[in-house]
Amino acid sequence: MEASNLARVREYLRAIENAAAGDALAAFYTPDATQLELPNRLNPQGGTSDLPTLLRRAARVPDLLKWQRYELVSEMAQGARVVIEAVWTAELAVAFGAVPAGSTMKAHFAMFFEMQDGRIRRQRNYDCFEPW
């Protein structure tokens, strides 16, 4: 189970890199999935998103980012839990505040996943953005 859960999370991150949306992205989640984003520079209040919210946000990604990549730094799985440390890099398709379109953003992520039947039920993100 641990190896298959880890493989599934890797597939999920590749799908995000490829701007998966709609049913292609929903296939990675349970219907009651939630994602908790802890406060960070991009989202100072943090917040919790349900599956419909996650899918709406994913549909907007191609308008906001030219590309995005996850460099996996470390990973581990224990039972139904998967933990990923990654460096996220993306190129902006549009200006973001004072940051012009075409600029690159970078963040260091710690992501904690709770899996159920090979799908993500809970995701908790700690995102540390580099200065922009």
Image (tube, grey):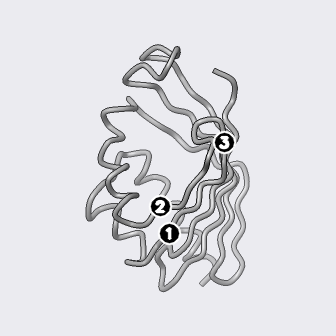
Q: Position of residue 45 (x, y in %)?
A: 61, 47
The mark nearer the N terminus, 3 or 1, is 1
Quarter containing the C terminus:
top right
Q: Could you tell me residue 22's position as x and y percent?
A: 26, 59
Look at mark 3 in the image and give the residue it sits on: 40
Q: Are marks 2 and 3 in contact (CB under 8 Å)?
A: no
Label pair 1/2, CB-CB below 8 angstroms:
yes
Q: Above or below — where is 117 with respect to 35?
A: below
| Horizontal side, residue 18 vs residue 74: left or right | left
In this figure, which residue is indicated by the disc labeled 1? 34
75, 102: nearer the viewer: 102
**Residue shown at 35%/46% (left/top)?**
19
User: Hey, what amino acid is under mark 2?
Assistant: Ser
Q: CA distance from mark 1 to mark 2?
A: 6 Å
Amino acid tagged 3: Asn
Instruction: Give residue 113's position: percent from left, percent from top.
Output: 61, 69
Disc 3: CA contacts within 10 A as few (<14), some (14-19) or many (>=20): some
Q: Secondary structure at mark 2?
A: strand
Please report the residue visible at 58 percent of the width from the left and 42 percent of the height from the top.
43
Q: Amino acid at mark 1?
A: Thr
Residue located beneath label 2 in the image: 49
Q: Residue furthest left?
A: 23
